[in-house]
Amino acid sequence: MELEQLRADMVAAMKAKDKARKEAISSLVSAVKKTAIDEGCRDDIKPELVDRVILKELKTVKEQIDTCPDSRADLKEEYQFRYDVIASYAPRQMSREEVESYIREKFADVVATKNKGQIMKAVMADMKGKADGKLINQVVAGLCE
């Protein structure tokens, strides 16, 4: 995802007077800018950085939804809307079957050791941003049995 696309969508939401959507996209743009400044690439923001920030924000909003009390339906609805907006920008994640076949194919020699720590170290470096870490951990645990 390009930062310029996010900005253009934010402007479109402002013109459409869609305040909730504008705020969700605006928070993404701010998070991307902050991360870029922290990493020292303020002027040259790569799509990989934008995707990484989007996934991080998606995870944060998911946690907000999960920890929100049921008595606060209004707040839960707001978080869900934000989650849906951010999810529309998130890069496609690999499914459980895709992760398992990818690990079996690409890391067959490491999987043969049945050493979970060693497998996770090799796999996570390669699959960062392509699949959820919890899913990768579950698949690796299954392969180690």
Image (cartoon, helix red, strand yellow):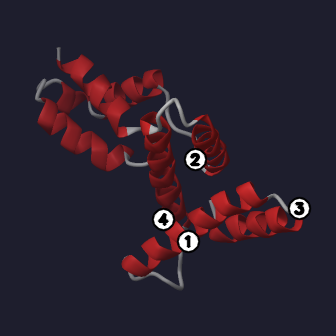
Whether residue 131 appears in this view of the structure is no
Q: Which residue is mark 2?
A: 91
Image quadrant where residue 119 sits: top left
- Closer to the chain start, of discs 1 and 3, is 3
Q: Quadrant of residue 19?
A: bottom right
Residue that lies at the very extreme toward the right in this rendered image = 16
Q: Nearer the viewer, mark 4 or mark 1?
A: 1
The residue that label 4 is drawn on is: 49
Horizontal and vertical percent for residue 122? 23, 43
- SS label for mark 3: loop
Label 2, label 4: how many angstroms apart (C-alpha)?
12 Å
Of residues 66 and 10, the one nearer the viewer is 66
Which quadrant would residue 12 be assigned to in this image? Answer: bottom right
Q: Earlier in the sequence, mark 2 or mark 4?
A: 4
Q: Give the residue type at disc 3.
A: Ala
Callout count? 4
Mark 2 or mark 3, earlier in chain: 3
Question: Where is mark 3, residue-wise?
Answer: 16
Q: Nearer the viewer, residue 59 or 17?
A: 17
Q: CA distance from mark 3 to mark 4?
A: 28 Å
Distance, label 4 to label 1, CA atoms, is: 13 Å
Q: Which mark is residue 30?
A: 1
